[in-house]
Image (tube, rainbow, N blue to C red):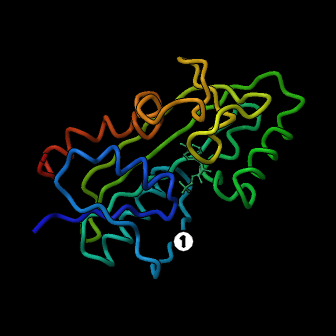
Amino acid sequence: MKTSLIIATRNQGKIKEFRELLSEFNINILSQPDFIQINENGNTFAENARIKALEVSGITGEYSLADDSGLCVDSLNGAPGIYSSRYASTDSERISKLLNELKNFENRKARFNAAICIAKKGKVILEVEGKCEGLITYLPRGSNGFGYDPIFEVLETGLTFAEMESEKKKTYGHRGIAFKLLKPGLNKLFEIG
Ligand code: IMP
């Protein structure tokens, strides 16, 4: 029987990215069952990823992959950080709020962080962290992706995440970078094919 890996999130944008990143492995990729409610009460991205992966793998008995990610803006002392998803109720409200908070700041430096944890039966198997440096734009640009993608310009490319095709976001994005670090461990855990 194929090994199952449960992605511990309800964010469809993240599930889509992980499905693409994991496509070469011969595994069943499932999303988190609706009945599981997780209290993300860690103080860091890594702690929150661990909490989610341990909870989902503990309840299901399967491998679980959790990512905790967010945008840290220098002029806002690292906010919204681990509170990125709770910063406002919708993506467009989160974007407007952030642009508004930054309207008097010339320093637009920011970074996306992603911590990924894989656990099985309540035990941590792999943990990594990836970062992507960039600038917060003055206006949204592009229509791909999700979340803060239209206002995050990647330093190395001059494009926002929302202006990139998914292949390019995989190369430069925080989750793609974290995933590369995870890859040697994944190759040992799962069959390719
Ligand atoms: P969590 O990791 O599910 O707690 O939420 C992370 C939040 O950060 C998401 O809901 C988005 O608002 C934001 N975020 C994380 N990764 C990305 C990304 O790749 N693009 C845009 N926004 C992101």
Q: Residues within 10 Å of mark 1 (few under 14, many from 20)?
A: few
Using the image, determine if residue 2 lies above or below residue 140: below
Q: In the image, what residue occupies the spot 13% across and 46% down? A: 192
Position above or below: 99 against 193: above
- Residue 75: x and y, percent? 76, 31
Position of the N terminus by quadrant: bottom left
Image-based side of 67 in relation to 146, left or right = left
Q: What residue type is labelled 1?
A: Asn
Taking depth in this image into account, of 126 and 173 the one nearest to the observer is: 173
Residue under the point 41% across and 63% down: 8
In x, y percent, where is residue 41?
A: 56, 65
**Where 81 sits versus 53, above or below?**
above
x, y percentage for residue 62? 24, 70
- Disc 1 marks which residue? 39
Camera-nearest residue between 70 and 25: 25
Q: Residue furthest right?
A: 104
- The residue at the point 69 percent across, 34 percent down is 151
Residue lying farthest to the bottom in this orientation: 35
Q: Is disc 1 placed on a helix, strand or loop?
A: loop
**Is 6 left, or right, of 163 in this rendering?**
left
Q: Residue at x 24, y 75 (%)?
A: 61
Q: For residue 152, what is the image quadrant?
A: top right
